[in-house]
Amino acid sequence: MSKGPDVFFRTLVTPIVFALLALGFHFFLRGHNAPGGGFIAGLIVAAAALLVRMARRRGLLRIRSEVLMPLGLLVALATGVAPMLVGRPFLTSAHGHVHLGGIGSVAWTSASLFDLGVFLVVVGATVTIIDVLAEEGGLSELREPSAPRRTDAAHKAPAAERPPDEGGR
Amino acid sequence: MSAALLLPLAVFTPFAAAVVAPALGPRLRARSGYLLWLAFVPALALVRYVHPAQLGRPVTTSLAWVPELGLDLTLRADGFSLLFALLVAVIGVLITLYAAAYLGRGERHGRFYGYLLTFGGAMLGLVLSDDLLALFAFWELTSIASFLLIGFWDSRAASRDGAVKALLVTAVGGLALLVAVVLIGIGGHSATLSGLDLAALRSSPVFAPALVLVLVAAFTKSAQLPFHLWLPTAMEAPTPVSAFLHSATMVKAGVFLLAKFAFLLTGTASAQVAMFLGLLTMFWGSYLALRQTDLKALLAYSTVSQLGILTAMYASGHAHGATAHLINHAAFKAALFLVVGIVDHATGSRDIRRLRGLGRRLPVTAALAVPAALSMAGIPPFGGFVSKEMFYDAMRHEGALAATIAVAGSIMTVAYSLRFLTVFFGPFRAEAPELHRPRAAFWLPVLPLSAATVLFGVAPPQATLATPLTDLASTSLGFHAEPLALWHGVSLTLALSLLTWLAGLGLHLVRDRFAALQEALTPRWNANTVYYGLLSGLERVAGVVTRRTQGASFATHLRVLFVGVAVAGAVCGYPVLLPKLSPVPVDMALATGLVAAGIGGTLLTRSRLSALIYLGLAGVASTLIFVLLHAPDLALTQLLVDTVTVILFLSVFRFLPAMRRYTRPGALAVLDGAIAAGVAATVFSALLAVQQPIAPRIAPFFLRFSAALAGGTNVVNTILVDFRGYDTLGEITVLAVAALSVLALLRLQAQQRSEPEPPAEGRPGLSAGEEERP
């Protein structure tokens, strides 16, 4: 690809992605009481990741996205196992209010932690598929032209354009 | 030993021995038989229940079989079962001993004894089980053992053919029996034979079909017309097997069934039909036996004929004489088969035309054969005469026609019995001039059988076990015992017997001319031609069906499948469900129209890019439907999934090959359209069916308790992460696995692509052996 993405697109992507991430956060938090939740929030973040891919031709995250999946599963599983430690059945939920002195109180539920696990798995799965399609699947539009293929160092990417700090991604 | 232990032991010891037999086979070879006959000892021990005090007091024991299903294996030795069990045990012992002398060195002894003992156990189980399903299971097991034993010499095409024929014919009966026992169980409100409510069974609507099915099962197993064809070809089995399974015991399983159900049969039209079929079988079997030139084939057709006698007598309710004849037949027929085995071994031939005067060279064998053959002919003072008289009495009772057929068949029986004996008399003639005389081990097992044919005739009634056994057996079947006696006084029956002997002798004297007549009268088709015709017809139909359905193109395949789906829906779904439709709101109709437009556009467009856009349209329209249904969570999810999918697809579709259009003729397009519409209607009614409430709706529960139990007011979310958290845990696991699979697949592919191309000749790092591979 000789020509990069449109400059307007590249410029606009940053605020849009921030807006999307904030939206995702919002949807995640309110999920228990209003439309939203871990699954939807995860998909919003995935959309943001896709935008970053298209504009900047690199990933949204600095860590390997596939790590998020086992992490999310662990969080969900831990939420399930925790009640067993106090003699309750697997996945028993608890909820209540935390009183914050004079300011008011915040409702909490253990299910939100489970939802966090769902969120992490969804983000991990979608972003992994996007990343791997971009890097290994030959989708050069979504790959930084300079970035080497992780498994194919000798491939067509010209070595001279490769920035020295991009090796980790 | 108590009955609770003895009955199961009697049934299961042969099975246990069958497991041991293959281990003994390679070491002891044929001699394993001298050890393995012990497996029948527990069954022999059942003889202790044979005394008058046991009348009306059957021995019963019950074992838990599949307790989870409430299935018990109930064993019950009433008089008739006892008789059969002892028959199986005695003949089983003698056959096992005989086989030890009969089998050559090169045989697969372990396998032979394994099959034989499996059969013995199955047969004992069959006659002793009270449980209807166990009865069926053992019944089938005897068929399978019979199949394995007929095909024992599996390198011979005739053996294989005989085995398959026997299995196919008896399997038909097995299926009939399965349905019959289920029907009888339903109609008689019991899973056991002894527990059946007979009055309820007789008045139930399943009675008639059950009765017919029982008859089919009995007729196939006992080789009665028109199912007699399998028995003669079953003679490809080793001779001990023919003696044990195909004359003395297994083929009598059908008669056993008939006798057990005789109390149901008496007085019905089926009984008349069964009796006449039995008589015809008796006549036809004798007629065919007279034609045979192979000693074993003669005995085979004779067995068909004799089983006809038993069928006719049990079906017409003359259980006592039938039981007496059953014992006699087992004795003389087993003896004769074993004699043929000895003759075959000594001369290498079984051809009646080539064997003469064997009595001079094989005097012991001849001495054993003569009483047995005369007993078969019904000549006094042998056992066969006693029961033949009872047969005549019974048939006279059933009318002139029945008596005529009986006498005609019996005349031919005398003739073929005499023909059998010709091989022992006259000047000596045989294929092999060097006769090797049978060892004592060979003829000793025949001795008790031959002796029995004499004893049953001449011994005082109580001296042999025959009388108490017969009494016990017929009373347990619900019939009166009559005295067994050689001399009944001067009567019409005796006159008929005299006629039979004289006519039989006359027929024997003109046998050559009669054989020519039979030759001239050979029918153009018989049961065998029908069997092979059916078989090849079946193969042709299967071929046509397979070619039409399996060999077709993928498109035709799909059409067949989908027509099935559409028809199923039209038959089961539409009539019930479509009337329940209610009018669709306008906004919903519009949204659905948008979805349809998206799908239609996707299908019709020629460019992949427009197809993708149409697909997006369909997705967004589905989102709209969710919004209209007040499901914001679903709408959000649908929108996001659709967006991400379309973008991802956009980025990969450049790599897909160009779209091709497939055209089809107009008529086919109409047909496919109709099929598609039918399938759509089926799917639609299936979805509608899912909507039908079959239980109280669960939604109100979630709405009511979501806040209290899960601390959240978004029910969709509380269901996902709390109420049905287990499901969600499973789903996210699947999601993670799927994503990891994509990762692994693509990354592995990329790695393979990036590997340097190996040079054409000789890859470095491979061993020499691998280099050789193409």
Image (tube, rainbow, N blue to C red):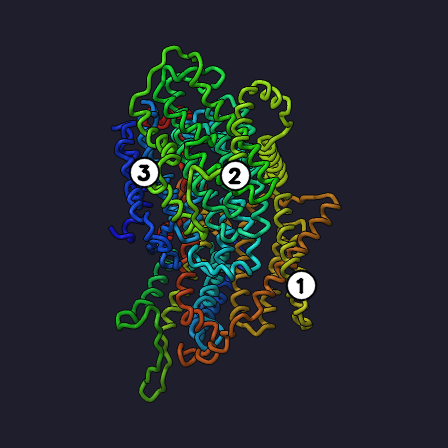
**Residue for point 31% across, 31% down:** B97
Q: Amino acid at mark 2?
A: Ser
Q: Earlier in the sequence, mark 3 or mark 2?
A: 3
Q: Which element carries disc 2, helix, strand or loop?
A: loop
Residue underneath mark 1: B575
Check disc 1 and report its element: helix, strand or loop.
Answer: helix
Say which amino acid is labelled 3. Ala
Packing grade of label 2 (10 A; few <14, some 14-19, many >=20) is few
Q: Are marks 3 and 2 in contact (CB under 8 Å)?
A: no
User: Of the numbered discs in the image, which one, if any, rests on residue B491?
Assistant: 2
Residue B178: percent from the left, percent from the top? Answer: 49, 49
Residue B51, given in percent of the width and then of the height, sits at: 32, 49
Q: Earlier in the sequence, mark 1 or mark 3?
A: 3
Indicate the amino acid at tag 1: Pro
Report how far apart the C-alphas of labels 1 and 3 lie in the structure: 58 Å
Quarter of the image where one finds residue B624: bottom right
Q: Secondary structure at mark 3?
A: helix
Count residues near mark 3 (Cα–Cα under 10 Å), then give few for <14, some for 14-19, many for 20+. many
Q: Return the residue nearer the eye: B303 or A84.
A: B303
- Chain bearing tag 3 is B
**The C terminus of chain B - image quarter:** top left
